[in-house]
Image (cartoon, rainbow, N blue to C red):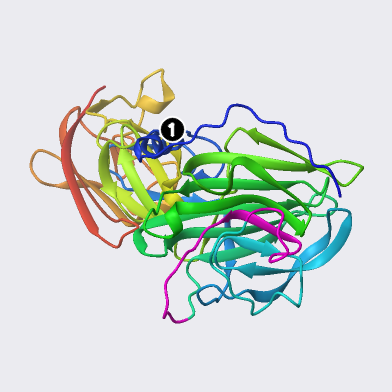
Amino acid sequence: MRISKRKYPMIKIHNHGLILLIILMTFKLQPGLTQVDAGEDITISAGLPVSLNGIYEGLFGIPVSAQDDYFVGPFQIGFSFSYFEENFTLFAIGPNGLLSFEVPDIIGFSHWDPATIPTPEYPKTIMGPYQDLFSRPVAEHSQYIYYATTGSEPNRKLIVGWCEAPMYSCEDEKATFQIVLNESDSSIMNHIIAKPACETNVGNRATQGLNFDDNTGIAVDQRNSTSWTAFGETWIYRQDNYGSYEIEQIDFQPEVIVPQGKLDWAWYKDSPGGELISSSRSTVVHPMESTRYYVEITCCGGVKYVDDIYVKVIPVPNAFNPNSQVEKNREFKFFTDNTDLVSNFRMYIYNRWGQQVFETFDMTEGWNGESSGKPCNPGVYVWIVYFRGPDGEEVANKGTVTLLR
């Protein structure tokens, strides 16, 4: 019998949702972690449009179609993985939180009552955690379970995830977790985003650990077919040269991966969670003053990531002097870092008698205080600007500017 060793920090067992709220607030305030990109900072003249486009930099998993309780597969790991000193290239998925290398014998096998490790019922199986999920009768579903192989040799990893899977007889309670196989060192990571309680089904018993056969396996302390809950945890199983494992709880940082369609967007003004301006990936704003915008994505289990973009607004000038020693003060013009956001641009300048003295259809061109090549008299002039923004909206702005000499 192989001997497996455990190495733990203090394990915290939580029995209510308060800790989940704290964890989600923590992840919501983590900007700049590259899971989402708000784009580059931009400078514009006041009132011009800015297209805010969020970019999701995480992964989308391959959906797994499964029915309640029955193992499905086989699926390709994408590399050779060592589990209790045996190498495997295929795996099967049990909807109740199971990843098994016992292919093909375990495919189609059905069981829902969490077993105690070690057990002969689930040979060569990772339980991460094993608890009864979903209900019968139910059609095959593909919106909850997913997998993906990422990276390049020798640092590839297989990610298998459960995204907000409803717990059996407690459908309002959702379980979200990931099992990750690492090619580089044959370690196994188990990210538990949320494992709430469901006391009405087998007393909330669940199992978290590794099983090999009827006398070999290792489980997390106090989580071997016992009642427990967990939120925001990462566990790692490290295999030594003798085929045994050490278990350690480490900092929580789940893989940024979701099933297709399971990603929510939000744009906020001034601060994360501040004034909501859009619930879409892209939106258009017309700021009149410099503003910082925050894009937020919400992944499975409510884990949030944030990035920001700063829009520097240059006030429309109210005076200019063609003879100024400062070059940028010699013309009256509008400005944006990205002229592609503005189409059908037109600017007209009129004197006090309503006569047109200047026009341009080029946003990069400004008025230098001349009309038909001759200097205009100093004084107050009226400007009118028309353009079409990136959302197709026709915009018109009007104001006055003083020509100085």
Decide: few, some or many residues near mark 1? Use Cα within 10 Å; few <14, some 14-19, many ≥20.
Answer: few
Magenta range:
116-139
Left or right of 168: which side holds 316? left
Q: Main secondary structure of the magenta part?
A: loop
Residue lying furthest top: 325
Q: Quadrant of residue 311?
A: top left
Q: Is residue 42 visible?
A: no
Q: Position of residue 39 (x, y in %)?
A: 49, 44
Q: Residue at x 32, y 48 (%)?
A: 49
Q: How far from the left and from the top, in percent, is residue 267?
A: 34, 45
Q: Residue at x 78, y 37 (%)?
A: 5
On-image quarter of the C terminus = top left
Q: Amino acid at mark 1?
A: Thr
Q: Is residue 12 magenta?
A: no
Q: Is residue 404 visible?
A: yes
When asked about the image quadrant of residue 331, the answer is top left
Q: How many marks?
A: 1
Residue drawn at 61 percent across, 68 percent down: 94
Q: Nearer the viewer, residue 84 or 87?
A: 84
Q: Residue furthest left?
A: 353
Q: Is residue 132 magenta?
A: yes
Q: Position of residue 187 (x, y in %)?
A: 77, 46
Q: Which residue is mark 1?
A: 26
- The answer to whether 154 appears left or right of 9 in the picture is right
Residue visible at 45% across and 59% down? 202
In the picture, measured across the screen, residue 244 lies left or right of residue 123, that is right
x, y (%) of residue 274?
27, 35
Element on which disc 1 rests: helix
